Amino acid sequence: MKNTVILIIILIFSVTIFSKGIIIGEDLFILKTFRDGKNEDILNIVNNIDEHFDEVIIHMGRANVSERGNFFFYRTSKENLKYFSDLLEDRGIKLFLWFFDSFGSEDFLSLYNDRFSLITSNKKFIDDLGLNYAGVVVDFEWINLGEGENTEKYMTFLKDIKTVFTGKELLAFTNTIDSEIENTKRGYDLKKMAEVIDGMIPMLYVVDFGLYYENDEIKMNFSDDRIENLLNFYSNYEKIYPAFSVTSGLLLVRNGKVFYIKDISHASIPDGLEIVGKQESQYHNIFKLNVKKDIEITRNDGVLETIKKGEELFILEVKELIYEISDYIWNYTFYF
């Protein structure tokens, strides 16, 4: 399993990349690579990063990064992370450490109320390892979802992190859209945030915006026009650097509903499938497949799925053009 996971990150770099940064946020990959990987595995990853990117954001954990069971609790994980950061520094690639994740007001407040202990603990952990890094990244989502108005607490949290991590950049993932009213409601005042931190990264998940089946075709809510509208909106603000998720994969239609079941490209379809149609858009293609016989597919969640002959199956493939319009690439893996 270790070699398979590490091979994935190497294979995906066969495409030409234009974005400035890569976000490494897949928990299983991080755990397997840094806990179980060898020096040559880390070196291979850095070599591939070096060909395409100027920055790396890596997930460290939700809250206290030194907790037992966390990605970098283990001795080997710490050693590999140190080696990773040293290699990146030698190549002139900026490393950002991402920790503090929450969804909803209650989840956010649990971190906010313990923020001084968490911030200082994480700072000590990083300092003790002697990591070479440019800054930190946080991911507080929907902080006003639920009871309460937490925008000011959010700003306080950001300021406290910035104060403790003196001299380091601070970036924040944001689940923002092209509506200032809605963004403010969710807890993001983009203009005020730009006065405090060094960058905001709106997370644009192509698949998560929604897929549906209509007239024997896959339809996407995240249309070309939608992408353009979002980019035009963000261009009116300072320090905003969009991150696109560009995962391509199998779409299974059952009972009129669309299910994204496995990351894959159209060039690596299993035996028993053939491409019989193609819908082309500016930023993505959708291939229609003929299921010639019953096949078994191991889904992203590890479950073995049987797809019957004649079932409706498609591949969503995001085009490389998406790299050119995004500052960061988020969570893109093609499983071959």
Image: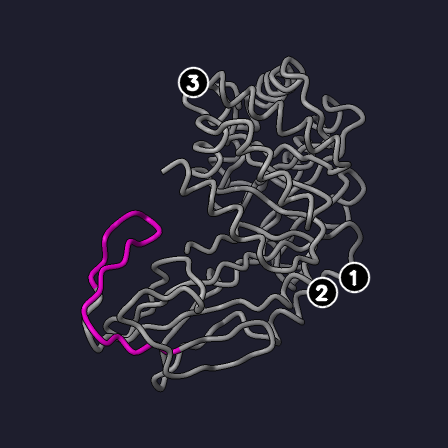
Residue 196 spot, x, y in % from top left: 78, 38
User: Can you name the residue that lies furthest to the bottom here?
Assistant: 215
At horizontal 59% and vertical 57% (from top left) the residue drawn is: 244
Q: CA distance from mark 1 to mark 2?
A: 6 Å
Packing grade of label 2 (10 A; few <14, some 14-19, many >=20) is: few
Please say if the residues under marks 1 and 2 sit with CB atoms less than 8 Å apart.
yes
Q: In the picture shown, does residue 334 fall above or below 107?
A: below
Closest to the observer: 183 or 204? 204
Residue type indicated by callout 2 = Phe
The N terminus lies in quadrant: top left
Q: Which residue is mark 2?
A: 233
In the picture provided, is 171 more to the left or to the right than 259?
right
At horizontal 57% and vertical 56% (from top left) the residue drawn is: 14
Residue 291 spot, x, y in % from top left: 26, 75
Q: Which residue is mark 1?
A: 236
Closest to the observer: 67 or 14? 14
Q: Which residues are magenta?
A: 288-306
At horizontal 51% and vertical 38% (from top left) the residue drawn is: 102
At horizontal 40% and vertical 83% (from top left) the residue drawn is: 277
In this rendering, the label closer to the viewer, 2 or 3? 3
Of marks 1 and 3, which one's residue comes earlier in the chain?
A: 3
Q: Please tell me in which quadrant of the rendered image residue 297 appears.
A: bottom left
- Kindly state the secondary structure of the residue where label 2 is placed: helix
Of marks 2 and 3, which one's residue comes earlier in the chain?
A: 3
Packing grade of label 3 (10 A; few <14, some 14-19, many >=20) is: few
Q: Which residue is mark 3?
A: 68
